[in-house]
Every structure is written in structure tokens, then in C-alpha cells.
Image: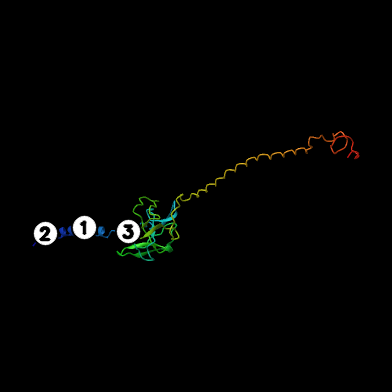
């Protein structure tokens, strides 16, 4: 009886440290489990539509600066471009409410449902597209192109199509018309030959009888002795 008591006390003393160890380990696990994981930083998505300056003027571009186009075949609220058309003219799609960048109007932006169930961004009712041949920001290779039954134009901040520049170049004044050639002066009229001088009238015929020299001193030129006519 005397020996059993110390053994029981020893066993109880051994249990206490083990219990404390278990409690300590459990506390450590709980602290790790309940530590708050830091929330990831939220970054605002780049705007889906903004305005950029190009040689066409101010036009709509996407978040990467790619030109956005409208399709004249589209009707309000519906896209007419799918299949192969959408390969060359990828629609500007969004997974939620599209953002609006500087220069663009939030009141003009919206979305439509495409035939494949995706959402496409619209502006002033026009579904917006990129062009596969625009490889860098500022490219406008799709401007004025006619394809897939309609024409494609960049979009102004007001939501209207942008007309392509004239062949003379955007922003360049039209060349002034060439001045009309001045006609060569008419040659001076040929000098007219002077009128021939009037022919001198021949002296009146006197039948070979000298005037006032008839010898009789009168004017009948009959000569001879005085005929008594008083010199007439």
C-alpha cells in the first residue's frame, strides 16, 4: 500500500506536462488558422472606351489605344457582324459595366447581347469593333473600308462616324487652283499700204495752141491779129 501511492502520484505528475503540451500545440494551431489573410489589392480596370487624337482628329479607342469602329450595316441594338466578319472586325466585349475614360461620355455608352451570348460595348447605339489589321495604337487602317455588306468608320466623341480624310491629306489645305493661262496677245494688224496718191489731172487740152500766147492778146487762144473783141 505504501509503495502504490508514490507511483500514482508520479503518473499524475506525468500527465500534467503532457496535457499542457497538448494545450500549447492546440493554441498554436488555432492562432495559425484564425490569422486574417490580407485581402488582395483591387485595381480599377482600364476604361473600355476613351478618346485619343489621331490624324483623323479625336476618335474613340479602347483601353490599349486601338481604334474603335462602327459598322453601317448594324441596326440599333443589334450587331450584323458575326462569323468571318467578327474575325476581321473583333467586337469590343465586356464582362460587366464598361468603363469610360477621358473624353468619352458615360451617358452614350452601353452594351448589347450578341448572338453567341457575349456582351458587346456600344456607343451612342453603335456596336463597337476593332480591326484586325490595326497593329498598334493610332492605326486607322479600317477607316472607310467597305466589307461584309457595309462600311466601317472611326467614331467621334459625340458618337458619330468620322469621315475619311481627302486624298490631299487630313489637315492640309486644298491646293489652290492653277491660274488660268493668259492668252497670247493678238498680233498687231498688218500695216495697210498707203493709198496711192491721186493721179494728177492732165492739163486741159489746148490743141497745141499756147494759152494766152496766141499773139492777139486775148484769151481765145486763136492767135492772129486782134479780132476786135476787146481782148476777150
Q: Nearer the viewer, mark 1 or mark 2?
A: 1
Helix, strand, or loop for circle 3? helix
Residue 25's tag is 1
- The number of discs equals 3
Q: Secondary structure at mark 1?
A: helix
Compared with 78, 208 (above or below) is above
Q: Earlier in the sequence, mark 1 or mark 2?
A: 2
Q: Which residue is mark 2?
A: 7
User: Which sits earlier in the primary sequence, circle 3 or circle 2?
Assistant: 2
- The residue that disc 3 covers is 85
Q: Nearer the viewer, residue 77 or 145?
A: 145
Q: How far apart are labels 1 and 3 at the CA level?
A: 65 Å
Going by the image, does 92 lie left or right of 201?
left
Image coords of residue 145 (percent x, y):
38, 55
Q: CA distance from mark 1 to mark 2?
A: 28 Å
Is 164 situated left or right of 33 in this image?
right
Front in this rendered view, residue 90 or 214: 214
Amino acid at each position: 500500500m505504501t509503495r502504490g501511492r508514490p507511483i500514482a502520484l508520479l503518473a499524475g505528475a506525468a500527465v500534467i506536462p503532457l496535457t499542457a503540451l497538448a494545450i500549447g500545440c492546440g493554441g498554436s494551431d488555432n492562432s495559425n488558422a484564425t490569422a486574417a489573410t490580407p485581402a488582395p489589392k483591387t485595381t480599377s480596370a482600364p476604361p473600355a472606351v476613351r478618346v485619343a487624337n489621331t490624324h483623323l482628329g479625336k476618335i474613340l479607342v479602347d483601353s490599349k489605344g486601338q481604334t474603335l469602329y462602327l459598322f453601317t450595316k448594324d441596326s440599333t441594338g443589334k450587331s450584323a457582324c458575326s462569323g468571318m466578319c467578327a474575325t476581321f472586325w473583333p467586337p469590343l466585349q465586356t464582362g460587366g459595366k464598361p468603363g469610360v475614360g477621358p473624353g468619352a461620355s458615360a451617358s452614350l455608352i452601353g452594351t448589347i447581347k450578341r448572338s453567341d451570348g457575349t456582351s458587346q460595348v456600344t456607343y451612342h447605339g453603335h456596336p463597337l469593333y476593332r480591326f484586325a489589321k490595326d497593329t498598334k495604337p493610332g492605326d486607322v487602317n479600317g477607316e472607310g473600308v467597305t466589307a461584309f455588306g457595309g462600311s466601317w468608320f472611326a467614331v467621334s466623341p459625340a458618337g458619330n462616324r468620322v469621315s475619311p480624310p481627302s486624298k490631299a491629306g487630313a489637315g492640309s489645305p486644298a491646293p489652290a487652283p492653277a491660274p488660268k493661262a493668259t492668252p497670247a496677245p493678238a498680233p498687231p494688224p498688218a500695216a495697210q499700204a498707203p493709198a496711192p496718191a491721186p493721179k494728177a489731172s492732165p492739163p486741159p487740152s489746148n490743141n497745141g495752141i499756147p494759152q494766152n500766147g496766141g499773139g492777139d492778146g486775148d484769151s481765145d487762144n486763136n492767135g492772129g491779129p486782134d479780132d476786135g473783141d476787146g481782148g476777150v
